[in-house]
Image (spheres, coloured by chain):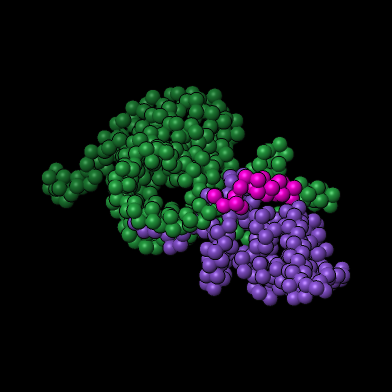
Amino acid sequence: MESTAAHEAGRGGPVTRFEPLGPTDVADLLHGLASAGAAAAGRAVERVRAPALFTRVVTGLVTGPVSSALGRLEDRAVHTDWSQDVLRSGRSRRRDLDRRALYLARRVAAAVVEAVLELVDVTDVVIDHVDLDAVVRAVDLDRAVERVDLDAVVRRVDIGAIVDRVDIDAIIDRVDVDAVVARANLDRAVARVDIDAIIDRVDIDAIIDRVDIGAIIDRVDVDAVVGRADLDRAVARVDIAAIIDRVDVDAVVARADLDRAVARVDLQRIIDRIDVDGVVARADLDAVVAKLDLIALAEYVVEGIDLPGIIRSSTGSMASEGLREVRRQGIGADERVAHVVDRLLHRPERTPGSTFEEASEGSRTRHTNRPGPGDPGLVH
Amino acid sequence: MQQPAQPPRNPIARIAVPRVARPVQGHRAGIVTRFLAAAVDAAVAVVAVALGYAGAVAAYFVLDPRTFRFPEPGFALLLIAFLGFEACYLALAWATTGRSYGCRLLGLRVVDSRGRRLRAWVAIVRALLCVFFPVVLLWVVVSPENRSGADVLLRSSVVYDWASASERDDGQAEEGGATDDGPTSPGG
């Protein structure tokens, strides 16, 4: 405010030059004057103690001239040392008042706000009257987030305690998994998954080592699995020819216990299924006969059947019809006596047995084709 | 052509024996047939004793015709002669062909446990048993296997065997007894 050059230019000596007063300086000046006036008035009142009516009159009469006088004093005050004193005094006074006003305002504001908050539901007021959307839009969240030290926040969070307090079961019960799945775009999610990378990261060996294959197999209902499997379709997809080409049949046969396998085969059943007549009908018997040495075969047959003995038996006295009839009757009588005796002794029919080689088959035939009482064979 | 190592056994029985009798060939005979065969053999013995008596008479007559008179040997001597002849005859027949005359008529054959011809001592013992203790034959009636008492003791059998190629049969039986432990066919 002060300027030595202004005084030097105006009066030929060191002159203090004052800068134009700002609004704050004017306020401080008025304040200083008011303070001085108030102090003087206080002292006068202390001394005079004039009646209130007089005071009002004086005040009314004095206010107008004082105001105009103050306007004139403004111009003068800035150019005088006295005015500077008044200004400094006003300034100091203003500062003191500011401190007091601030102190008072703080106390009053705290009390007022406390009382107001007791009367007013701030939450409702905010919800009803504050445009939160606008507030949020006005907030630069990115910048706010950038200022947050998330690492520090995370370090201070006791994740374990939080997890311990969380009732996972209740949360899961409340989750509508079906709805979540229905809303999820699984195709897109799966398309984004890098299956190869996942597989590369999976330690298959470790997983297999931890798996109790025996327990899994024990729990599997193999019958049910096989029952649900469409084996026909599976087999239809198998390239049997390729499999056979890859099989080392010689090695397989070398390892097989063919004797035991053949022992388990029901050859009789297989033979029963063979159409022998069809096979014979297809055979070229003429070619077979042409290969035979019929003369040698005839000699062998004649030697085997003892043709001279047959001729003697058929033409000799022992082979007469009468003798054969006696023999037949004897055999029939033997069987009848044996039958009666067996019945009397309450035992199964006797089995005389055979000492001839072919008698065993004869024994079977005897029991199956035994002539009945009316048969003209042995029982006559 | 590759032929079997051995011709089929007993082919005669399969060809010459009537069809209805083939199933029982080789089976042990019953009491009726065996009794008839024994009766025939007894008749043969009686005839033989009679012929012996006639021979003795003829001999006496030739030697001393003047004092000739029919001898009276008595029942005991005739019985001894009968039993002795019967025993010898049966032992000889069973040890050689396995058939006595009665067995031949009735189509029977006496064989051992393997179907072969009896050994000599077995045939002798069996003949003595059958002649002096004929009651052993009756065991056939109650035996489940149609065995007589002599058969049980000597492990022999009397089987139906209508084929009669005896010479060839015996030859084969000899071979079978020497080389084959299995049952062989005495009839073929």
Q: Is residue A320 magenta?
A: yes
Answer yes or no: is residue B32 visible. Answer: yes
| Image side of residue A73 versus residue A116, left or right | left
Residue A276 sits in quarter: top left
Chain B, hue in figure: purple
Residue A368 sits in quarter: top right
| Image side of residue A291 versus residue B140, left or right | left
Q: Which residues are magenta?
A: A314-335
Q: Nearer the viewer, residue A7 or A45?
A: A7
Q: Which chain is green?
A: A
Q: Nearer the viewer, residue B132 or A104?
A: B132
Q: Is residue A324 magenta?
A: yes
Image quadrant where one finds the N terminus of chain A: top left
Q: Position of residue A255 (x, y in %)?
A: 39, 63
A132 is higher (above) or lower (below) than A279: above
> Residue at point 40% right, 29% down?
A133
Residue A169 sits in quarter: top right
Q: Position of residue A102 (x, y in %)?
A: 46, 42
